[in-house]
Image (spheres, rainbow, N blue to C red):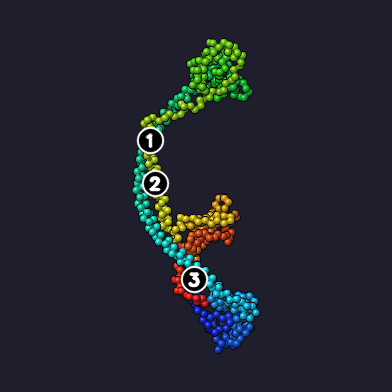
Amino acid sequence: MLLVLLLLPMCWAVEVKRPRGVSLTNHHFYDESKPFTCLDGSASVPFDQVNDDYCDCKDGSDEPGTAACPNGSFHCTNTGYKPLYISSRWVNDGVCDCCDGTDEYNSGIVCENTCKEKGRKERETLQQMAEVTREGFRLKKILIEDWKRAREEKQKKLTELQAGKKSLEDQVELLRTLKEEAEKPEKEAKDQHRKLWEEQLAASKAQREQELATSAFQELDDDMDGAVSVAELQTHPELDTDGDGALSEGEAQTLLGGDTQTDAASFSDRIWAAIRDKYRSEVLPTDLPSPSAPALTEPKEEQPLGPSQPAEEEDEEEEETEEEEGGEEGEDEDSQETPPPAGPPQTVSPTEEDKMPPYDEQTQAFINAAQEARNKFEEAERSLKDVEESIRNLEQEISFDFGPNGEFAYLYSQCYELTTNEYVYRLCPFKLVSQKPKLGGSPTSLGTWGSWAGPDHDKFSAMKYEQGTGCWQGPNRSTTVRLLCGKETVVTSTTEPSRCEYLMELMTPAACPEPPPEPPASGNRDEL
């Protein structure tokens, strides 16, 4: 079509005698030496009835130059521009429809012949289009050659990566074995270290618990006869079991396992666990000395009160002794005060002794060796994954359909944007299409790559992107990208012709067809 339009100036007007409104291609049907047969074959009339302003043929072919037949056609010769068919109803209607004015030969209207000016502008447009097509096709050939070279390089790199992958796989398996071998002594040493520590911790906790039980027994043994009786246990109402605020004789005897009294060993083994959480120590805090302190704390010289302050027990004893010997005045004052009840004994909060100690030198050496083996294995495994990903990407790119000669391959790693009043549209060919509000916000997917979507005879003239973000109570968004010939690669427009279905136009040299050969110089011949 472009070739025909460019060659229009080469055509010479041929004067062939024919009735008004008849095209040159149909003139042989209008032979004045014989009757005219309607073009649809419906009738024959004398030739002098052609263009007699009366419609004789059903198809209106006997009145090509008048408005007698509403279904007839008038041919505008439009010398210097493109010929044109118009409806016979427009003949002599006072409106200049043909650029040469031949449709208004009998209306009294004088039509200016604008065909030459239109032809000139049309030729300029066609020449510009031809120039774009020629330049675009030149660039397209470069793109094709670039892809050929790039494809060869990618194929070569793929071969190298596939060969290197086998070596990496062997290295990973070797390092995996070395790692596992290094982790065995590491695990054994760490398990042994933890076991020893847990045993020490358990022994320490058991010792502290025994000390608590012993201290409580000594506090309860008011008469120091080496046994805790029901009456002595009743001095601690906090051990009440029925919720009435007092510890009855029966309740106390039940706590003692049905006995009337218990010795230190039985108290520690059986009784202490049952009363431990409720029991409140009678001992006063060290900062409140009292006359009763010696009696209460005397057993502490050999048995600590409890684990709440294990590191300060000796200091407390010394302070209390000093207060007994030389603090007469303080004793008088404090003796007037009633000692506040102390809280129940509690286990020691986590201290340094509850933390697992550092590993010994040999265990740490095993750990360091295993960690080094793990690092080497993980590094090799990461390298293998990177190579596998590179292989997948190269295989996908090499096998991708980038057009008949790979001319569209250069679009594969590019993205192009078009900014409108409301949105920024982004096209990443062969990947996705999205839109984002111009004033900020999250992007919305208008579809991911589906397939080439041009007609059968021009498959690579359009792309289809599908399964985008769903519309509210509607389908998933999709986009058709129409490819147009251009010297540059740019998105020229985006519209939404149907709800949730977008149409985008991308100008690219890859879409330029091979142009027709340039016509020879035509001089000033501009007639059709």
Name which residue type carries label 1.
Asn
Marked residue nearer the N-terminal end (1 or 2): 1
Depth check: give the residue in front, 35 or 289. Answer: 35
Which label is found at residue 325?
A: none
Q: Are circles 1 and 2 on residues that touch, CB within 8 Å? A: no
**Residue 145 placement, left or right of 417:** left
Which label is found at residue 383?
A: 2
Write down the quadrant of residue 95 in the picture.
Answer: bottom right
Q: Are circles 1 and 3 on residues that touch, CB within 8 Å? A: no
| Residue pointed to by mark 1 | 368
Q: Say which residue appears at 52% left-offset and 13% top-offset.
A: 321
- Judge the density around disc 2: few (<14), some (14-19), many (≥20) Cα neighbours within 10 Å: some
Question: Is the residue 151 above or below the residue 234 in the image?
Answer: below
Q: Which element type, helix, strand or loop, lies under badge 3?
A: helix
Q: Which element type, helix, strand or loop, lies under badge 2?
A: helix
Callout in the foreground (1, 3): 3
Q: Position of residue 295 (x, y in %)?
A: 54, 13
Which label is found at residue 2?
A: 3
Name which residue type carries label 2.
Ser
Marked residue nearer the N-terminal end (2 or 3): 3
Q: Exactly how many numbered labels are in the figure? A: 3
- Judge the density around disc 1: few (<14), some (14-19), many (≥20) Cα neighbours within 10 Å: some
Question: Is the residue 408 above or below the residue 387 in the image?
Answer: below
Q: Position of residue 72 (x, y in %)?
A: 60, 79
Marked residue nearer the N-terminal end (1 or 3): 3
